[in-house]
Amino acid sequence: MDVLLWVIVPYVCLAIFVVGHLWRYKYDKFGWTTRSSQMYESKLLRIGSPMFHFGLLFVIGGHVIGLVIPKSWTEAVGITEGMYHFMAVSIGAIAGFCTVVGMIILIYRRRTTGPVFSATTNMDKVMYVFLAAVILLGLSNTVVGNILSHYDYREGVSIWWRQFFTLHPDPSLMANAPTTFRLHTLAACALFALWPFTRLVHVFSAPLGYLWRPYVVYRAKPNSRLGSRDARRGWERSELPRPEDRAHGSHTSSRR
Amino acid sequence: MRVMAQMAMVMNLDKCIGCHTCSVTCKQAWTNRSGTEYVWWNNVETRPGQGYPRTYEDQERWKGGWVVSPSGRLKLRAGGRVKKLLQIFANPVLPSLEDYYEPWTYDYDTLVKAPLQEHTPVARPYSLISGKPMNISWSANWDDNLGGAPELTKNDPVLRKIRDAAAESVQLEYKKTFMFYLPRICEHCLNPSCAASCPSGAIYKRAEDGIVLVDQDACRGWRQCITGCPYKKVYFNHRTGKAEKCTFCFPRIEVGIPTVCSETCVGRLRYIGLVLYDADKVLEAAANPDDTALYQAQRACFLDPHDPEVISAAQRDGIPFDWIEGAQRSPVWRLIHDYEVALPLHPEYRTMPMVWYIPPLSPIVDEVTKVAVDPESPESHDVLFAAIDTLRIPTAYLAELFTAGDVAVVEKVLKRLAAMRSYMRDINLGRDPRGEIAEAVGMREEDLYDMYRLLALAKYDERYVIPTGHAEDAHRLEELATDCAVSEHIGLDGRGTEGPFGADSGRGPVPVAIQTFAETKRRQQADEMGRPADRQGGLTQ
């Protein structure tokens, strides 16, 4: 049972996550969008959405620190257990609180604003259930693991998580974690499996490239190909490569 | 010098009768889909008026276009790259549907299915957004023909500006009002701020002809382009969650026929042609600190296609020879450069717009008789010139639209138009043409006549000089009429057609011309472009 829950299920979910994204990107770039509903309703969104998203960014950052970085590393640079604990609980609680409040505002808005609700798909609803479950269980981890009782996830869950990517996960590490941690992990697995088929894909189009690219993008019809496909093997045209593409220079940069 | 070609348009406002045929045909061709009900790639505004969306020209509020920073650098009015990314979760200056209008349809069914009753059944309006009955209180053209004036008109941002500036009493009272029509499409700017605002880099300018397009596969719906465009000509398809904008009908342009709006223009007031410009000069020109100098700065970017140096540079930069020829015959170039009667719309937004306008010469007979020096010939040119200062449409208003407030430029254009009328009047009445009229506006008589021919007669092949996309490139135009902002979304509520994973999930982008896998394969492997008759199934399959 432990092997099923903490080895097989997570790997299956990971596989769906990866392959699902590749499949969606290949076949549904047109559907790959945030599907913003700001046009319908702006007031609540302007409070709820930044709260939720920025809170979530901190939460994700906390997960990276907690799961990826081994305890020995932080201790090596002189961060004591007490300091780490204090940072994790305080920042984690604030970020988690913002995320939950933001989420409540957004769900309230989605349910009560007519046009937004009618633009909500069934998949959105399923996704919201899992997303909310993951977030609430995660917040309860902070409460259960740090305040009610003490569970050092960096001695348990984190190790399992790293083992997971070195392909030698030890299911007993998870089996011995408190219930909320186990439920949080399972709900997260389910969410990852759903991910590629929901609007959550927009996470992977976070437009960081905008910080570096030239302001105005130029595109030219490709010179190298005759038509929209490459020539078949053995049927390439014999031609001298053109010395320069039409779109070039400082103000412009060509894509494709 | 780096020569690039730009497909551009000029509209002669003197001839626009505000019939909205351009808007309607454009909508039928491109935006009659679910999610784009409120989208008008082409709209005709009555000026003075609030425009569409309401008060879009108030950039203090909507933050469109570029500004020059004190250090002389060009930056987006809505903020730099980091600020834009921080605002990505909720765009603070996105027009809401109320600033456009809530689209509706009528419950036509009741007209047919109502039982026998005393009163005639009525088709009630239903919102296409919420699906509920609604009261219609605004639309794309609510203030058409000064409807609602003066209450609505006084919110016109342009009118406010000239009022503040000159404390001028602009006449809004009945019988003293003025108005004219302003048809608008996307400006296909040389320095597009929508493209610069797009975090995903999905909006691009075509290197061949300068048409600005949205890559529907790359757009992620961050909505920054809508804020970025000062003309508010990028729209958000609220069903697909993607930005859409005027495509300059590129599938038509590529095969040498004018855009739908131009083709169907009843007044024959639109001109399409190429302009060659020096891409290296664009940024510098757009960063000119003086707003009123931007018109000339933009003109200085343009290159004379008759100049041998330009021709050789253009060939070096890969512009085909027939395109250079097209640029030489271009009516747009003639109106901008030879006759200097076309002006850009709001050059102060610094996007270097490429749809230009010939300002309207308003009905002047009343005014003329008032100031007539020579009552014998009320349309002699000096009388007309004198009347321009007292036109019903204040030149200050036109200047605010077309030259960032420089009245002298607008007056010069209006004088040329008046001179053309006066000169041609002599010819039409069988009198000797008077060369001094041409001289008075700094033109030659032949130019005045040619301008008359282009503006008044406006022959089809002179209005539209559109060199085709290259025959040897024909394969590259494979998706004629398809590879643009269009993908079919069936069903008003979007349900019923969803895949197993919700709306938009798991369905590939299906170009409207391709119906089946077999046909796709056949088309990909064909040696020549397909004929519609060869199509299997048909468009509705």
Image (cartoon, coloured by chain):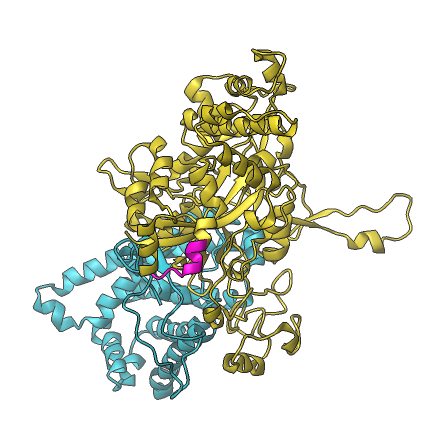
Identify the residue shown where x is 48% and y is 38%: B56
Tell whether position B105 is magenta: no
Identify the residue shown where x is 29% and y is 34%: B289
Magenta segment: B318-325
Q: Is residue B119 left or right of residue B396?
A: right
Q: Nearest the camera: B510 or A41?
A: B510
Residue B201: where, in percent of width, then height?
A: 36, 59
| Type of secondary structure dominating the magenta stretch | helix
Q: Is residue A123 left or right of residue A205?
A: right
For chain B, what colour was chosen?
yellow
Q: Nearest the camera: A167 or B487?
A: B487
Residue A43 shows in this picture: no
Residue A210: where, in percent of width, then height?
A: 31, 57
**Chain identifier for the cyan-coloured part of the image:** A
Q: Is residue B353 left or right of residue B364?
A: left
Residue B439's quadrant in the figure?
A: top left
